[in-house]
Amino acid sequence: MDSLYFTIDHRVIPGYVIDYSGRLVHCSRAGSPSTIIPYSTKHVDSSSEFGSNIFEESTDYINYLISSYTKNSVHCDHLLQSAYPDNRIKVVDELYAKQARILQDQDNIDSIIELYSSLFEEGKFEQCEKIEDGLAECGVFRIPFRNTLLSRYHVNSTISTAQLFVSKYGWYNQKRVISKTILC
């Protein structure tokens, strides 16, 4: 049951959330409180944790556990109800970023991001993928757009919000937004 929630300073924190990009994220005491999603430790995307490679099955399984524990009056866990007030995994308007494996200074990161933007504008998407992979090793990730405009991640360069497209991707790491995604 510890993996479904944990407490820190008398606050109940859910052990799982779904981030803005739709990924299932595990949180625990081992995570840092200063990351974008506090206490986040990893994406849940492998069969090792729930016996399934399919995200929806993992999410459904966790929701089933939450629901069955909170609805069973004999074994009702009030801390679990506090962590999941709707008896479901909470969807947060934040992005998970794993820790960097390779450390780079910010000037190098900024140069690589500019190169990515130039290649993206030229339609060199295969090279962009390689740059994304390299930036991911440095703990830097592209900000997605999922039909919801979030001011901390996106800039709308038009008046309309009917049909928005990415004109330039933004980037983030575990602690902050490096640059925002520009939409038009």
Image (cartoon, helix red, strand yellow):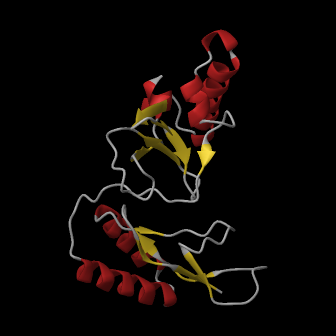
Which residue is rendered at x = 30% and y = 62% of the image?
137
Q: Position of residue 48 (x, y in %)?
A: 42, 31
Q: Position of residue 99 (x, y in %)?
A: 31, 56
100 sits to left or right of 169? left
Q: Position of residue 175 (x, y in %)?
A: 36, 63
Q: Is residue 129 visible?
A: no
Which residue is rendered at x = 68% and y = 68% of the image?
148
Q: Nearer the viewer, residue 90 or 83?
A: 83
**Figure check: 126 above or below 182:** above
Residue at the outermost right position: 162
Which residue is rendered at x = 39% and y = 46% of the image?
39
Q: Position of residue 144 (x, y in %)?
A: 55, 68
Q: Nearer the viewer, residue 38 or 20?
A: 38
**Figure check: 65 above or below 182:** above
88 sits to left or right of 6? right
Which residue is rendered at x = 69% and y = 37% of the image?
86
Q: Quadrant of residue 176?
A: bottom left
Q: Is residue 10 visible?
A: yes
Q: Quadrant of residue 164?
A: bottom right
Q: Quadrant of residue 88?
A: top right
**Figure check: 128 above or below 59:** below
Residue at the outermost front position: 10
Residue at the outermost top position: 74
9 sits to left or right of 167? left
